[in-house]
Image: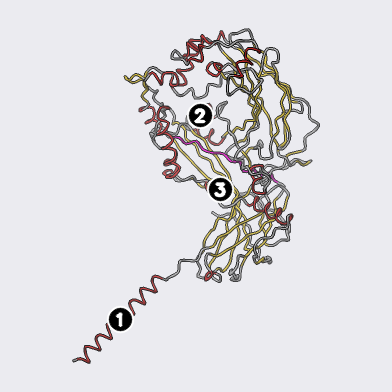
Amino acid sequence: MKAHVLQLLLLSTAAFAESLVDQTDEKVTPEPCKVRAWVRAEDLSPDHVSRGELRIKVSRVECANQVASVALRLQFDEFGEVKYLKKGAVIPEVQASNQTASVESLDWMANDVVLDYQAHDDAKSDPELWTVRAEERRVWATEATLLDNNPDLSHPIVTPFTVVVPAVNYPPVTTRYRNLYEPVPQHAFSDLGYRYMALVKFVNGRTEDVLAGHTTFAPSSETRPHPVPFIANQTFADPGCEREYPTARKRAERLESCLPEAQRSTFVAEITLEDGNVVQQGQTLKGRVTVRGTNGSTVMARLSLRLWSLSRHPWAQTQAEKGGDMLFYNATSGMCRGESALVLDANSPNFDYVFNDTDNQIFSTTVSTHQELSLTKPYIDFELELPRDVPVDFASYYSHSESSMRMHLDVIYSRDVAKCMQPNSLDVLDEEISTEDSVKTEEGLWDVYTPIGKPRQDESQYYRTLTLAADIPVVVVSHSSVNNSIPHYLSPGALAPVLQRGTEAEKPGSFPLVEPVFIVEALANTSARLMQSGTSDPAKWRQKYMNFSRRAVMNSDPTQDYRGGSYAGLLWRKKVVAEERGIWPLPAEVVEGGDNQEPFSIPH
């Protein structure tokens, strides 16, 4: 009996131990091997061979022999999206409610009643009134196998490649941002990107596409003939921005009541650009602006000049017109739609901090100047230095990038008009300021904000200023110029680049033709991004911001990977500078390529 019990005990102990082993085996089952990839490479440009290197690293040591091969793909994608009103659709006007606005909000809101935005906002997210569409255009893709035969990845491997580009101008990558504060009105947006993808095949047959970085294209411009001066006249006007909002309309109505347009001065700018209105990246736009005014009641005070970048959206415009929205262009274009944008460029001042050229990291640059005007000096001489990363004028499939010199003229109206505009005005409007410079200089000594020796400025001017605008067309061309005209990528018979293995670039016998593939985004995904509910009420700005933040998290941007991974051009420049300075990277195995070039292909 005792022997039988002992036998059962031994069997149960063995079974328990075996179950522990099984559980232990389950717990230590390794995660699938993962691969990280980086690309550093020269920017693409027409009729050029771009040199590059792919770096591959596995997540764990035991994965060192689990990669069968790695190919590298370079693909060029474009994206466009649009939201327009269906034919006959009408958005209800904002209505006045029965509530009265508080005294504190009367001046900045410019309304004596609280406005009801509900019906107006509900209509902006009503699918019965709107059409939304988004699509991606795969222009080309080229790939080659860079690593094969189960390479040893116990250390990171760096392997070279080249991209042979035909004599074709492709568009540069320009950083632009959506402003999708809900509810989204009529809307157009486009983007494009050049992405490197590492196509990893494991020994067990599993495949994985790893984003390895992004790059850009630097188009070339045709060499200009000897420049001649550009002379033009432009009349300043109220740009009327945000007039679709009741508060802005109310403010404009009050201005017209207190200062009728017929009583205001008319101002005309006489512009001379010394070297013409075509300017290269990195050069200087020089000239003079003289402002003449009629004998009205407003007086010119300050003039600012700024290089302005505009995006036109011909694809979206065509979609809207076909759908019956004939007001789409005015709603999405014009003087209020300019933006600050930069092209991707490894030599941009934005990256100076990477090379210890400066301690300051620059996130944007504004090409502008601002000067005072007077009756005795009604002109300004200016020199606007254009950085290398200012956007060039270029027409792509979904958008056209254009430039202009935007002029903003501040004109001053009287204190009586200001008090009429703001009945609950600040005390600053009641203080009279002497016109004598000596008196204003004495006042300046008692003002902490006035530079010593300078006359004190009339603070009331900031409360009685009207800003007018005018545009001068400017064409920005690439810093790289050639003698002959280079074909545009949208022209018939345009050729696509070829990615090759190794360092020795051989020009293909013939480049492949561009054969775009279109991919329409699922309507549900586009609607989730463009048909969100929200509020247009400026008094609820916090809610608007929260809605924007929520949308940014919940509704991903289809183009977010266009700038995914590291910028290959910046990493290449870091390599070049490191070699120049004698700085060497950590050891990595460099593998030269062979002859196993994969054929050009466009994925479907």
Query: Sequence order check: which comes first, mark 3 or mark 1?
Result: 1
What residue is pinned by disc 1?
15
Q: Disc 3 and disc 2: Cα gap in Å?
A: 27 Å
Whether residue 492 sits left or right of residue 133 in the image: it is right
Task: Specify the label residue 328 is tagged with.
Answer: 2
Of badges 1 and 2, the one in the foreground is 1
* Identity of the residue drawn at 72% across and 36% down: 280
Label 1: which secondary element: helix
Whether residue 28 sits left or right of residue 79 in the image: it is left
What residue is pinned by disc 3?
562
Report the amino acid beneath label 3: Tyr
Give percent across and percent down for residue 145.
62, 63
Q: Which of 201 and 270 is in front in this view?
A: 270
Numbered marks: total:
3
Give percent across and percent down for residue 563.
57, 48
Query: Sequence order check: which comes first, mark 3 or mark 2?
Result: 2
Q: Disc 3 and disc 1: Cα gap in Å?
A: 55 Å
